[in-house]
């Protein structure tokens, strides 16, 4: 790819360019002296809000941020911010979040009939992952209690309530 050291971002851009020309992952890997599965990750990705190219994945959910932005986002979940997000969830949905709400993949595996709606609500907002809440407070229920709410009883399941209420966006509420 020319003289000098080639950055990973340059290799990703070149892999995407070559893929656009119709080359296979193997052909690209040979040209860029890279592993074929790595090349697939390179051209399956997207672009982060900061402009960096994101490596993709063959997994179900592809990353939407570059590693730097992802790490920066991860470090912003203080106890105070998590409490605010729990309270915001209650304002939006009229009920406390369950651990399944903030780990939607688990709801699907638990057989929740509302798994798709749970995933959509999670992806519609900026919510900490259930593990983040557990790390900051020691347990999911401790976080819910610190936010001023009563947690659901143990083993309540992915949705022990009457169902998922429609989302009311804050902007829609303000405009009404």
Image (cartoon, helix red, strand yellow):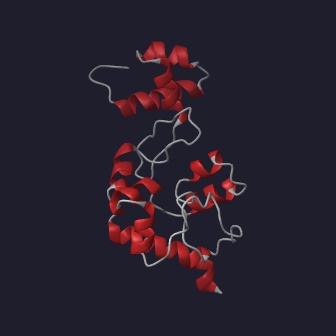
Q: Is residue 75 left or right of residue 41?
A: left
Specify the quadrant that holds the C terminus: bottom right
- Of the pair 62 and 144, the residue shown nearer to us: 144
Specify the quadrant that holds the N terminus: top left
Q: Which residue lies furthest to the front in this view?
A: 154
Residue drawn at x 68%, y 49% as measured from the top left: 111
Residue 59 image position (x, y, % from top left): 56, 35
Please tell me whether residue 111 is drawn above or below residue 152 in the rendered image.
above
Q: In which quarter of the image is residue 158?
A: bottom right
Q: Is residue 34 left or right of residue 6?
A: right
Q: Which residue lies furthest to the bottom in this view?
A: 176
- Of the pair 151 and 28, the residue shown nearer to us: 151
Q: Can residue 62 be seen in this view?
A: yes
Q: Is residue 77 visible?
A: no
Residue drawn at x 34%, y 67% as measured from the top left: 79
Residue drawn at x 35%, y 56% as measured from the top left: 135
Residue 93 image position (x, y, % from top left): 61, 74
Q: In which quarter of the image is residue 12?
A: top left
């Amino acid at each position: 790819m020319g003289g000098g050291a080639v950055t990973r971002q340059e290799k990703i851009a070149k892999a995407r360019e070559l893929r656009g020309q119709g080359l296979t992952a193997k052909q690209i890997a040979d040209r860029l002296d890279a592993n074929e599965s790595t090349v697939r990750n390179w051209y399956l990705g997207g672009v982060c809000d900061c402009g960096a190219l994101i490596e993709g994945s063959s997994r179900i959910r592809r990353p939407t941020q570059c590693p730097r932005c992802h790490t920066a986002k991860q470090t912003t979940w203080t106890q105070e911010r998590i409490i605010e997000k729990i309270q915001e969830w209650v304002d939006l949905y009229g009920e406390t979040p369950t651990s399944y709400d903030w780990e939607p993949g688990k709801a699907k595996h638990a057989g929740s009939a509302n798994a798709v709606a749970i995933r959509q609500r999670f992806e519609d907002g900026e919510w900490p992952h259930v593990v983040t809440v557990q790390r900051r407070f020691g347990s999911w229920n401790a976080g819910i209690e610190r936010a001023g709410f009563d947690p659901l009883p143990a083993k309540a399941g992915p949705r022990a309530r009457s169902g998922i209420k429609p989302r009311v966006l804050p902007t829609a509420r303000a405009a009404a």
